[in-house]
Amino acid sequence: MLQMQIKEKEKERKTEERDEGKIGFWLLPSDIELFSFEEAEKLGCSDIILPIEDLTKTADFVTKCHERNIRAHAWINCLRYRDRWYNPDDVMATTRAQQLIRRAFELNFDGIFLDDLRYPKKISEAAKSYQKINRMALELNSVIKAVNPNALTIIGVMPAMNEGYKVYGQCSPCLAAYADIQVPLTFTDEKAADPSFVERVTRWVVKKSAKPVWAGLTAFEDKEEIVPASQTQLKRLIKAAEKGGASKALIYHYGVSLL
């Protein structure tokens, strides 16, 4: 009994230590081989988002994360698959997401990052229903907690703030009920490199959600030409996210060599 209590205390201590990290990295499949755990640890990296669908590389990487006391979260595109968008009423989309969630926990992921839980911008406003998006979030969060009650449910939200429910069918304050953490995806906006924009969006989501927020930041000045942001620029964005109330800066994608 005593040994079990000691182990639980040790587990709690390690969890607290991990939560102190202020940096997280969002990796594409091509980033996995390039990732430097040594550099990430120096920066206080505590969390990594990984694509669930490239399983040949992902499984071993999750183990490496845990060896270094870093949490690994599975990245799941809820309503988009191979550049096709699905309606939240489509049973195929929900079933696929549920299957990926279960697969993620078989691979020992610590949490689930629900991305693209929204409508594409090009759909008319009349066709969008944030209630349907909320319902899907409820269903997926229920699956996550049923399989692993201690897992984190992380939901990415577009940085449209008050217009989110009109433009993307996303009601950020509503989705907070089904998430442990929200991630405003500031890197999806043309103002992504503007620290004042990052701070404003982050503060809005923090205030409206009343949940921990990890600000999604871009590691690139020009995504079309794949031009990395300078070290100075990236640090400004991180500082802006902190001023906005973010508990962590989640850098998309990778960017560790730039800090």
Image (tube, rainbow, N blue to C red):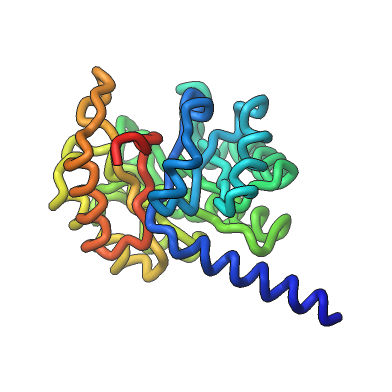
For image coordinates 14% across by 44% down, the residue present is 194
- The spot of residue 233 in percent (x, y) is 18, 41
Q: Residue furthest top?
A: 225
- The spot of residue 178 in percent (x, y) is 52, 61
Rendered position, 5 above or below 17: below
Q: Residue furthest bottom?
A: 2
Q: Is residue 162 left or right of residue 123?
A: left
Q: Residue furthest right?
A: 1
**Residue 225 falls in which quadrant of the image?**
top left
Picture quarter with the N terminus:
bottom right
Of 167 and 36, nearer the camera is 36
- The spot of residue 44 in percent (x, y) is 42, 54
Q: In this view, does 126 lie to the left or right of 51?
A: left
Q: Can residue 167 be seen in this view?
A: no
- Number of on-image labels: 0
For image coordinates 52% across by 29% down, the residue present is 32
Q: In this view, does 8 lie to the left or right of 81?
A: right
- The spot of residue 236 in percent (x, y) is 18, 49
Of 1 and 118, nearer the camera is 1
For image coordinates 30% across by 44% down, the residue present is 217
**Residue 189 falls in which quadrant of the image?**
top left
Of 126 and 223, nearer the camera is 223
For image coordinates 74% across by 76% down, the residue present is 6
**Residue 248 falls in which quadrant of the image?**
bottom left
Picture quarter with the C terminus:
top left
Q: Is residue 145 visible?
A: yes
